[in-house]
């Protein structure tokens, strides 16, 4: 039985914001050809064998319908030089095509938009969707990876803003 929390959602968000997370751009294509593009910081690897990852998305997201109707999804790990992409894909009220406008992309397997400027991409098929509160957990079976070695650190999110590590990263 769930008890009523002794804090509000703003305080909960502030506390969780003290944990730095990586920033990814998620793209998807539905069977009707509709595309989605969104910024996600709730991403993690789940399994090496078989290769599986997950990300979480709010059920209120403007990309939610397309994600739920997509079999093919790509996750792009953003570099600190791609804050503009993260901000664009996080803009509410824009459709997937509008978010992709002005961002270089190519059609990947099954038409999913791939962002070639990102240092790392994982793409695959949706495996399972688990509803939890006002979000869903999307599990992907990965069948495509691309790594472009880079010395530029990954973009992170910490205390409500985009940040980047100061250290140079070895290849």
Image (cartoon, helix red, strand yellow):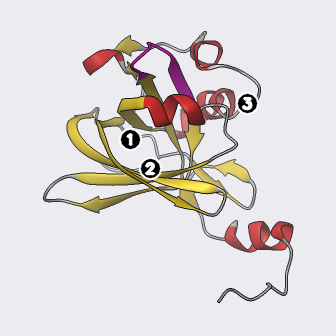
How far from the left and from the top, in percent, is residue 129?
A: 42, 51
Residue 32 among those drawn in magenta = yes
Q: Nearer the viewer, residue 40 or 58?
A: 58
Total marks placed: 3
Out of 33 and 11, give the one closest to the viewer.
Answer: 33
- Residue 115 position in % (x across, y down): 42, 22
Q: Secondary structure at mark 3?
A: loop
Residue 26 visible (yes or no) = no
| 42 on left or right of 107 | right
Please state which of the two labelled residues, at mark 1 or mark 3, is closer to the viewer: 3
Residue farthest to the left, as pictured: 49
The label shown at residue 55 is none
Q: Are marks 2 and 1 in contact (CB under 8 Å)?
A: yes
Boundaries of the magenta span: 30-37
Q: Residue at x 79, y 84 (%)?
A: 5
Q: Residues within 10 Å of mark 2 (few under 14, many from 20)?
A: few
Q: Which residue is mark 1?
A: 151
Residue at image position (67%, 39%) is 61
User: What residue sits right under mark 2 in the picture?
Assistant: 168
Report x, y in % for residue 152: 44, 40
| Residue named by callout 3 | 91
Q: Residues within 10 Å of mark 3 (few under 14, many from 20)?
A: some
Position of residue 108 measured from the top left corner of the image (x, y, whole percent): 30, 18
Question: Which image quarter is the C terminus in?
Answer: top left
Q: Residue at x 50, y 19 (%)?
A: 35
Depicted 7 relative to depicted 27: above or below: below
């Amino acid at each position: 039985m769930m008890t009523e929390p002794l804090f509000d959602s703003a305080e909960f968000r502030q506390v969780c914001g003290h944990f730095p997370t990586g920033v990814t751009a998620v793209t998807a294509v539905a069977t009707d050809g509709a595309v989605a593009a969104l910024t996600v910081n709730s991403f993690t690897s789940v399994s090496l064998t078989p290769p599986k990852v997950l990300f979480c998305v709010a059920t209120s997201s403007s990309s939610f319908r397309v994600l739920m109707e997509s079999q093919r999804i790509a996750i792009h790990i953003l570099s600190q030089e791609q804050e503009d992409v993260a901000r664009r894909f996080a803009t509410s009220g824009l459709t997937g095509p509008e978010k992709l406008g002005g961002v270089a992309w190519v059609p990947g397997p099954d038409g999913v938009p791939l962002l070639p400027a990102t240092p790392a991409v994982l793409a695959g098929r949706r495996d399972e969707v688990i509803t939890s509160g006002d979000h869903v957990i999307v599990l992907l079976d990965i069948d495509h990876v691309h790594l472009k070695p880079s010395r530029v650190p990954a973009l992170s999110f910490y205390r409500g803003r985009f940040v980047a590590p100061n250290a140079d990263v070895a290849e």
